[in-house]
Amino acid sequence: MLPALKRQLPHVEPMSQEQVEQIDDASMAILEEVGVVFRDDQAIEDWKSVGAEVKDGDRVHLDRALVRELIQSIPASFTYHARNPDNNLPFGNDHSIFVPMTGAPYLRDLDDVRRGPTLEDLGNFHKLAHMLPAMHSSAHHIVEPMDHIVSHRHLRITYSSMKYSDKSFMGMTTSGKNAEDVLDMCAILFGEEFLETHPVVTGNCNGNSPLVWDETMLSAMRAFNKRNQPVLCSPFVLGGANTPASTAPAVAQLNAEALSALAYTQVVRKGCPAIYGHYLSTVSMASGAPMAGTPEISLMNFMIGQMARFYDVPWRTSNTLGGSKTFDAQAGYESASTMMAALLAGANYIWHSAGWNEAGMHCSMAKFIVDAEQCAMGYRMAEGVRWDDFDEALAAVRDIGPGGHYLGHAHTLANFQDAFFMPKMFDNNGIEQWVADGSKEITERALTEARALLGAYEEPKLDVAVDEALRDYIDRREREIPAVEALNTEY
């Protein structure tokens, strides 16, 4: 695995300091004057306990001084701990991590067939995430295992994340109790006391834009907060549908929503890690469909990066998003546009970094492989220019002189593997060689690579006693939890 990315490129910051403060003031005015609905009795009591004003039963009006005081206790950085300590990750400030997509109810499989996923398919994605160097996490439900009862899935998904990879992972937040189950399993894997002082898992809580947080998300948020585990506080933005149809005001609303949740994490447990989140999409004014890779999404990412740094909190964005139904040029263009903005905006938690297509409705095996390589390329770019061999390389100029070539020079031979990124999934041969190799397009090449990786996979074995304890926990909880069929996803 590549270490956590330490970014060296300057951020793209389209707002002046005055404009940052204008967004901040507008967001604080929304919190004070409009308020945010918290559809959760416990959250209302929690807000009242710190002096927040509650009107109409569940609309919380937050004074800006209270919000500023609360978010000051959010750590600007911390370290994610994996079961393999070699895969621990510094996080926040100038460090970023890439996390695969999650939540797809379909996949495009190793034969590029769109179908419903199984638990085995999920395991294969976790194996690929484990093997691909630029993926820093096995995430959680990359695809929904449709062959398992919904009310039991969070247990099997969590076990798959833990079993097939020793990298960091995410935890299901589809209910407060499901989140508690995930955290209990983390306590089995790491130890309860370890959780108290070490972030080991990430939860995601989506807001219902505009300006609503519901009981499901808030109960899961509290479960993570109480165990001192980080949660992504993520308004779900469909620009023009649940925000104003204008970029800057949309960011002002999103910022208010994120701040309200970030502040609440500190009401639950002061000092617990929390991450400024969002899911960004703009809506086609012609059809109402969500779009990806648009200029306004990039601008919003740049602006949100500035706001997160203004508050000195780490932040999450989404990566390699696409609306295409197949792994085609549209998918590539949308994903590349999204990734470039995420990197230049300075995002810390770069989620949905592999596989996303069809507006998140499916995860593509082929795209998963190519996206991961694209993340490795983005990683190399964001590291910045290397200067460590500057003098040696200049000496080669004197050795070669006018009209020569560098291919056989000692400096080239010493550095050719690392001098320039060489994509494995892109074909840069001449057309004659490409035809001789079977005229394979990128989807076929990527699926061939996926099969090869899965064939070479070696499981990072869990401790036998820990594995047995996890299985026993799952068996017990599956006996206790009623079999309910319903679908929850996260973005």
Image (cartoon, rainbow, N blue to C red):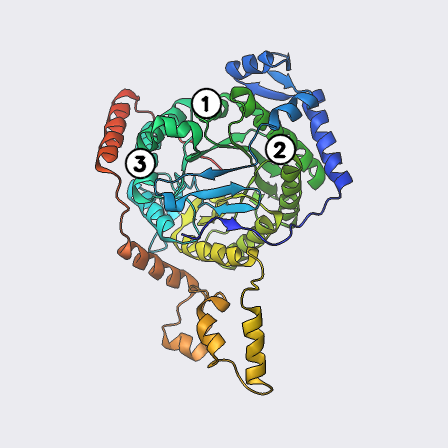
Mark number, residue 436: none
Residue receiving disc 2: 242
Q: Amino acid at mark 1?
A: Lys
Residue at 43 percent across and 39 percent down: it is 103
Q: Amino acid at mark 3?
A: Tyr
469 displayed left or right of 80: left
Q: What is the spatial separation of the Cα atoms under label 2 and label 1, in whole angstroms?
A: 31 Å
- Assess whether mark 1 and mark 2 are in contact (beta carbons under 8 angstroms): no
Secondary structure category for the residue under label 2: loop
- Assess whether mark 2 and mark 3 are in contact (beta carbons under 8 angstroms): no
183 above or below 137? Answer: above
Mark 2 or mark 1: whose residue is earlier in sequence: 1
Q: Amino acid at mark 2?
A: Asn
Residue 280 x %, y %: 58, 41
Residue 404 x %, y %: 55, 86
Residue receiving disc 1: 226
Q: Crowding at label 1, few (<14), some or many (≥20) Cα neighbours within 10 Å?
A: some
* Residue 240 seen in the figure: no
Q: In front: mark 3 or mark 1?
A: 1
Secondary structure category for the residue under label 1: helix
69 displayed left or right of 88: right
Which image quadrant is residue 384 in?
bottom right
Q: Crowding at label 2, few (<14), some or many (≥20) Cα neighbours within 10 Å?
A: some
In the image shown, does 414 or 426 lie closer to the viewer? 414
Residue 101 x %, y %: 45, 44
Q: What is the spatial separation of the Cα atoms under label 3 and label 1, in whole angstroms?
A: 22 Å
Q: Crowding at label 3, few (<14), some or many (≥20) Cα neighbours within 10 Å?
A: many
Which image quadrant is residue 347 in?
top right
